Amino acid sequence: MAAQPVSRVVRRVLRAGVRSCSSGAPVTQPCPGEPVVEVLSRPRPFLGEHAAPFSAFLTDSFGRRHSYLRISLTERCNLRCQYCMPEEGVPLTPKADLLTTEEILTLARLFVKEGVDKIRLTGGEPLIRPDVVDIVAQLRQLEGLRTIGITTNGINLARLLPQLQKAGLSAINVSLDTLVPAKFEFIVRRKGFHKVMEGIHKAIELGYSPVKVNCVVMRGLNEDELLDFVALTEGLPLDVRFIEYMPFDGNKWNFKKMVSYKEMLDTLRQQWPELEKLPEEESSTAKAFKIPGFRGQVSFITSMSEHFCGTCNRLRITADGNLKVCLFGNSEVSLRDHLRAGASEEELLRVIGAAVGRKKRQHAELFLMRQDSPPALPSTFRNSLRVQVLRHRVSFSSQMVTLWKGGGVPQAPLVAQRWLGSSLPQRHFSSHLDSDANPKCLSPTEPQAPAASSGPLPDSDQLTHVDTEGRMAMVDVGRKPDTERVAMASAVVLLGPVAFKLIQENQLKKGDALAVAQLAGIQAAKLTSQLIPLCHHVALSHVQVQLELDRTRHAAVIQASCRARGPTGVEMEALTSAAVAALALYDMCKAVSRDIVLAEIKLVSKTGGQRGDFHRT
């Protein structure tokens, strides 16, 4: 089963860093005479019961008591997750309009006084705020506050967690959508997989139990890793929480990308039929399950398929001080403005109470799309979808294990699209990452101008990979000078009208074919020397893979370019990239049609070698 190799690798890496004292006991079991490290997931002794009845200001018209407050410490984030925001980021609120530390603590103090007993710090990425440790320490002093949690992407967690634990942090949620380093970098457009895993390890080491791992499940992207995530709970105190893909501003939500709770549960039961449901906690958003004998558990956040609005007890304060009574609602009221206008505590409570009183029974407008069969999406919605999903099939061989441990992952590709007419979109893919390129990831990719011809290369009178006796031989490049080498190759995949239409509308059941082909081409370029026996290993400095749909031929045109500085050329890397991208596209479409032709795989241009440049007319 595919789950086992990945989980064993991850468990091995996590456990490798567990320190032991001289007695051999793990760090969570201190040596005799050492102070005991308190496990902060239990209630702290300084926190007491509520001294007064629950506040009417935090109780809505449906009787829901809001005892859980989420406070965003910042709008900034050090990742650029594809389902969350564009690569260039989002417009940020001026610093003067954001809540100050004192304003955050003033509001927190007021909410706790009225009955809030759990506060979670969020973002953006909360751990990039410089005074996050101080904020936690001051929240700890609020009488009646039982839990101080944080939701983080984990990049800075290992470094800050010891200080946060000492300050009073009692619960940790880490966002992690894949266990594949290359896919991680594709999703978040940044490096950092190993830092996240180090942060999870550090949380376990310091005694947090469970450490919650939030995984947004997206069809065609990571639903093939469900079993791998669950297998981690066998030996680690994790609560892996699978979250149904939800719409947010800018993520171009598509019903067909959502994997429902029931579908995920069916997948898990096929592997572990003994999976048992745990009792649901009051106001919990999660449906929890456990495999007998496993140390951790699995949960599902069913925001889309089975909403939990009826028991919602959550309120949110944004980084600029707006109170949101529903994550999906657009209604907000500025507590910051009232604070800065000198409002008294009673006036603030009236504003808060009025907002809570207007909270709807449920976010009904989103559930119009909750049907057993996906609805037909309007063409304007469908044509505006941002191409961003891939299905990444990885063989977890020793090669992938090496990549996992060493961080050798491909650069995250940019994605672009443009239109040919009002109804038929022409989809373009580009992994171009030059610093002088347009940074906006939704900018159209300009077509390549036809290359000028500089004439054919002179013919060679012998094959370079054959010795004088006709035996294969690898060329010795040790004495050749290092020069800048660039090569471009192309390929055409003749899809036929059926497969072409499905790709154009991004409706293939296996996922986004163009995104898969793009990533396959990038990986192939990096692995050329392992595929072509007599090729030298080349340290590529850049790989670019573009795919364009040609509706006149019902074809996909692939263009791959590679760059490196060294003693040998990169034309084989470019050719391998184009060819494997074409093969990946065939694989994605073969269930629809086997009448697909791979054609015109050729070198387009090559520069930097001793034999001169080559440009095909």
Image (spheres, grey):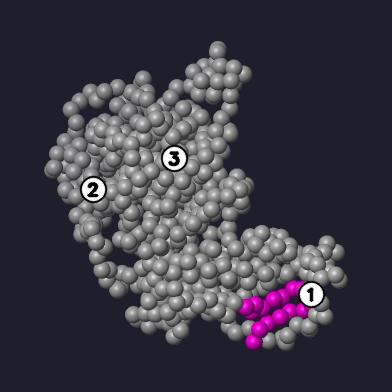
Circle 3 residue: 231
Q: Residue at x 46, y 33 (%)?
A: 236
Q: Secondary structure at mark 3?
A: helix
The amino acid sitting under disc 1 is Leu
The amino acid sitting under disc 3 is Ala
When the figure is inspected, residue 369 is found, relative to residue 116, above or below; the finding is below
Closer to the chain start, of discs 3 and 2, is 3
- Checking the image for residue 434, the label placed there is none
Q: Residue at x 51, y 29 (%)?
A: 205
Closer-to-camera residue (528/445): 528
Crowd band around label 2 with a 10 angstrom C-alpha radius: few (<14), some (14–19), many (20+): some
Determine which quarter of the picture holds residue 46. top left
Circle 2 residue: 307
Front: mark 2 or 1? 1
Answer whether residue 613 is magenta in the image: yes
Answer whether residue 514 is magenta in the image: no
Q: Secondary structure at mark 1?
A: loop
Give the magenta-colored segment's residue range: 602-617
- Residue 578 visible in the snapshot: yes
- Checking the image for residue 463, the label placed there is 1
Residue 342 image position (x, y, % from top left): 29, 42
Residue 11 as seen in the image, left or right of residue 55:
right
- Marks 3 and 2 sit apart, C-alpha to C-alpha, by 27 Å
Closer to the chain start, of discs 1 and 3, is 3
Crowd band around label 1 with a 10 angstrom C-alpha radius: few (<14), some (14–19), many (20+): few
